[in-house]
Structure formats: C-alpha cells, structure tokens
Image (cartoon, helix red, strand yellow):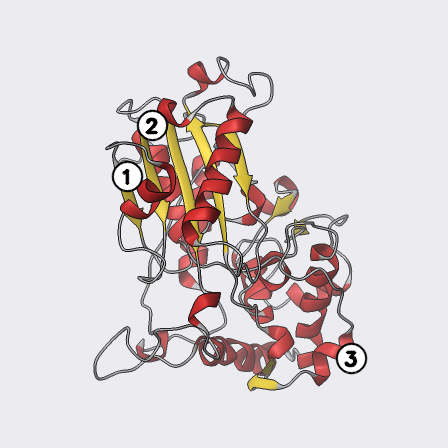
Amino acid sequence: MVRHGIANKIAIIGCEMTKYGERWDKSQYDLLAEACLGAFKDAGINKDDIDAAWLGVFYYFTGLSGTTLEDALRLNGKPITRVENYCASGMDAFRNACFGVASGAYDIGLACGVEKLMDEGGSGLPGFRIFGHPVLPLPSAPAMFSMAATRAFHEWGWTKEDLAHVAVKNHDNGSHHPKAHFRRPLTIDQVMKAPMIADPLGRADCCAMSDGSAALVITRPELAESYAHADDYILVKANEISIYTMAPWYWPGYDFSEFPATLKAGEMAYKEAGITDPRKEIDLAEVHDCFTITELLNCQDLKFCEKGKAVEELKAGTFNWDGEIAVNPSGGLKSFGHPIGTLARATC
C-alpha cells in the first residue's frame, strides 16, 4: 500500500479553546463561537476566509450534523462535516481537515470540536446501555479499563498506589492552567481514599465529564506566511488513526496489557514523521488518560519506555512537566477535562 501522508503539507495558523468544565452558562453554540472566533482572531482572518470546516461531536444531544457549527457561526452554506469517532472525534476532524487542505481542494480549513455533556446529568457517560451490540452489551467505561489495571497488577506487580501517582502528577499540572476543569492538586492519600468506581479504579482514577470546545485554523505552508503567524506557524508532521474492536473482551487472545490501536497509530505516525527513537525524539506528549491506567499503558505503547516499566519511569520523574518526556503537562483528561468530541488539549 502506498502511503503519501501529510508531513510538512499543513500549517496550523490559529488556535483557541474555551475553559473546560461545568459550563452551565454557555450552550454548545456559545462554546463553539468562543473557540472558533478566537482561532480566527489568532490567525488574523475572519469567518468568510474559511473554505470548509470539520466538526468533532460525539453525542447526539450536542449535535447531529454540521448544522451545529453553522448555527454557531453562520458560515452561509459552506461545507461542514460532522465527525464522530468516540474520544478521537476532535482529532479525527483535524485529520480530515488536513487531508482536505493538503489535497488542494481548500486553502483554509477549520477543525473544531465541542461537547455539552453536563446538561444531561446522570452518574456517568450517557448512552452505554443504548450503544453497541444488541446481545453483547458494553460495560461502563470504568469497568472496561479496570480490566487493563487488573492485568497490569498481575503482570508487572503494579498497585493502586502506583496508579495514584498519575492522578497526582496530572492534577498538579492542571492546577497551573487557567482553562483546566480542575485546578486543585491531589495527594496520594486523597486518591487512595476516593470512593471505588470499578475496582481497582476509584473516583480519583477517573476523568470527569466536561463541557468545552477547541478550534484550529489550517492552511498549506506556502500560504501560511500571509497570515498572523507568518514567522511561527506550526507544521504538521503526522496525523494517523488506527481502529480495533470496541469490545476486546470478546477478542480471543487479547490480554489487556496494551492497546493495539495505540501501538499501530504510533507506529504509523512515527514512520510518517521520520521518528525512529521516540524516547529521545519526543519532548512532550498529550496522551489519553481517561483513567490513570490508560496513561501508563499509552506511554508504553508509544515507546516512551519498555513494557512494564511505565510506573518506574513515572516515579523517577521521567513524565513530569520538566522531565525527559513531559506527559500531559496540560493536566490531561484527568484534570484539564474531557469533552468527548473536542480537540486534544496540547493543540492549543
């Protein structure tokens, strides 16, 4: 298979995001307008300069189509595509925007995402009893990842206290970010004593639901010098995605010690970007940490350390904001927040 990729073909020229959290004061349209108009201002453009847009939204109650963005911005009939891909929705919107602009079909693209979860109430992510297979139901999200934690405990001798170090690190990082959902540090003792959700994951091991929006403006490098960030635009080196089953517990041979999709996407992205030694070449990483165990396994799958060694590296400070590889310096999903359809924190 021939893979051409988008390395060095896309320039990010504007970005903005809202504060994440319980945003009772704003609708999804308000949040989108704040993020997108802020990104336009950052890029030195106005909404009429946008040729096409891609919108990441996971939940139907946030929005069912591109009209969610149209109703927020009034782009007057320009092409808008809603992208839904679980927690990767926002980044997949960015990926598709990159392809649209890199192809030459559009000069300036908007990639954005929004989620308005908190208005729905409830005690966890909505929809898990509705979505999925009619006979083989989905467990809750904490229950899914508790299987990975239990396996890691068995395989490598990790403990609940080891997981707590992830929460402590990320909440300390998030406490310094003005747009983070939670800006309060946690102690190991607080994490350990938090109510149990899905053994061994307690409440402080789980990210919260959040409202929020983020937006990026992109163009091709040869056009980027015409805009506000002429001297400091960001070149995209790779953007890859990999999809495996949503129900690995029905997958014979899967042992929960790694995430195959992360392994594959990382492998493809590193190849496209020309990275051969991630431990030495990556300085900062925003990785999925919907649960504390998820960050540790992702660090291993992305080759920041050997398999089974993530806890050791974490405790040694390797993944601190001032460590060898700063992992989730924003605070991650755990502290910064997790509006499902939005873009990753580090992009802004």
Q: Quadrant of residue 2?
A: top left
Q: Is residue 24 above or below residue 286?
A: below
Asked if residue 280 is positioned above or below residue 316 in the image, the reply reads above
Percent position (x, y) of residue 344? Answer: 51, 49
In-front residue for pair 141/183: 183
Q: Secondary structure at mark 2?
A: helix
- Disc 1 designates what residue? 80
Residue at figure coordinates x 61%, y 53% from the top left:
304
Quadrant where the C terminus is found in the figure: top right
Q: Residues within 10 Å of mark 2 (few under 14, many from 20)?
A: many
Residue topped by disc 3 = 189
Q: Can you tell which of label 2 and label 1 is closer to the viewer? A: 1
Per the image, the residue denoted by label 2 is 101
The amino acid sitting under disc 1 is Ile
Res. 5 visible in picture? no
In the displayed orientation, state which residue is furthest to the front. Answer: 25
Which comes before the other along the chain, label 2 or label 3?
Answer: 2
